[in-house]
Amino acid sequence: MIKGCIFDLDGVVVDTARYHFLAWKRLADQLGFIFTEEDNERLKGVSRMASLEILLSVGGMHPDNQKKQEMAILKNQWYLEYIDKMTPDEILPGVTSFLELLKSAGIKTALGTASKNAWTILNHIGLSNIFDSVVDGNRVTNAKPDPEVFLLAAADLKLNPDECLVFEDAVAGVEAAIKGGMKCIGVGSPEVLIKADRVIAGFSHADLDMIEF
Ligand code: B16
Ligand code: MG
């Protein structure tokens, strides 16, 4: 029986991928190569430094570690400019009411994200008090598809992994949930999230039947 639901942030609760894209594109522009929205798809759910490596491979660049750190800092400064303007209107449809429904049914909730900016986003969208636990990129050493982020969330909720259900939009995140011994509902396309137990398009019609396994 599912006693806890763990939500990924980008692509599940909000669509911050477009802000990541704007900031990464600005970096690529400055470095003098083209970075497309299609390239950006490969960065979803991937940590900041791993994202930078992918971006640099697109541009065929091999800077030293010091330069890479500077680039990541610059990208994050631009990203923060974008997310500092976020409002509760940017919560994806149905998410808030589904979180409230889970709470009223006694199901615990957690956020499990690769982002180190999760608290900034939660404060801007007004969801900083709704989750029983928040595990962000500052609390983990191993990025998805390693299950660390979700296992930490389960431990925070004092639940066994098999009592937890993860909502994820990224392939690496679905793999992390499964490796962690949890159920996983993919949010997005069934053709992409093939390893998920179920796939939904979004939370507009989400109900408690959906979390029965
Ligand atoms: P930050 P998620 C991920 O969020 C994003 O999908 C990914 O594109 C980003 O690189 C990563 O967070 C790190 O974000 O630069 O803010 O630390 O999907 O795990 O919620
Ligand atoms: Mg995501």
Image (cartoon, rainbow, N blue to C red):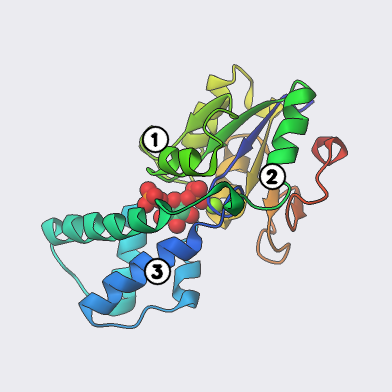
Contact? badges 1 and 2 (CB < 8 Å) = no
The quarter of the rendered structure image containing the N terminus is: top right
Q: Is residue 146 above or below residue 66?
A: above
**Which residue: 44% across, 62% down?**
19
In front: 117, or 185? Answer: 117
Q: Is residue 196 above or below residue 43?
A: above
**Residue 193 quadrant:** bottom right
How far across and down, in percent of the image, does residue 99 sit? 70, 35
How far across and down, in percent of the image, does residue 185 sit? 71, 46
Q: Amino acid at mark 2?
A: Val
Residue 46 is at least partly visible in this image: no
Whether the residue under disc 2 has CB within 8 Å of ligand 2: no
How far across and down, in percent of the image, does residue 86 sit? 48, 52
Cα–Cα gap, marks 3 and 2? 24 Å
Question: Mark 3 vs mark 1: which is more N-terminal?
Answer: 3
Residue carrying label 1: 140
For residue 22, the mark is 3
**Which residue: 46% across, 44% down?**
121
User: At numbered mark 2, what does the secondary structure look like: helix, strand or loop?
Assistant: helix
Q: Can you tell which of label 1 and label 2 is closer to the viewer?
A: 2
Q: Is residue 184 above or below residue 208?
A: below
Residue 173 is at least partly visible in this image: yes
Local crowd size for mark 1, using a 10 Å CA cut-off: few (<14), some (14–19), many (≥20): some
Residue carrying label 2: 95
Q: Amino acid at mark 3?
A: Leu
Local crowd size for mark 3, using a 10 Å CA cut-off: few (<14), some (14–19), many (≥20): some
Cα–Cα gap, marks 3 and 1? 26 Å
In front: 64, or 117? Answer: 117
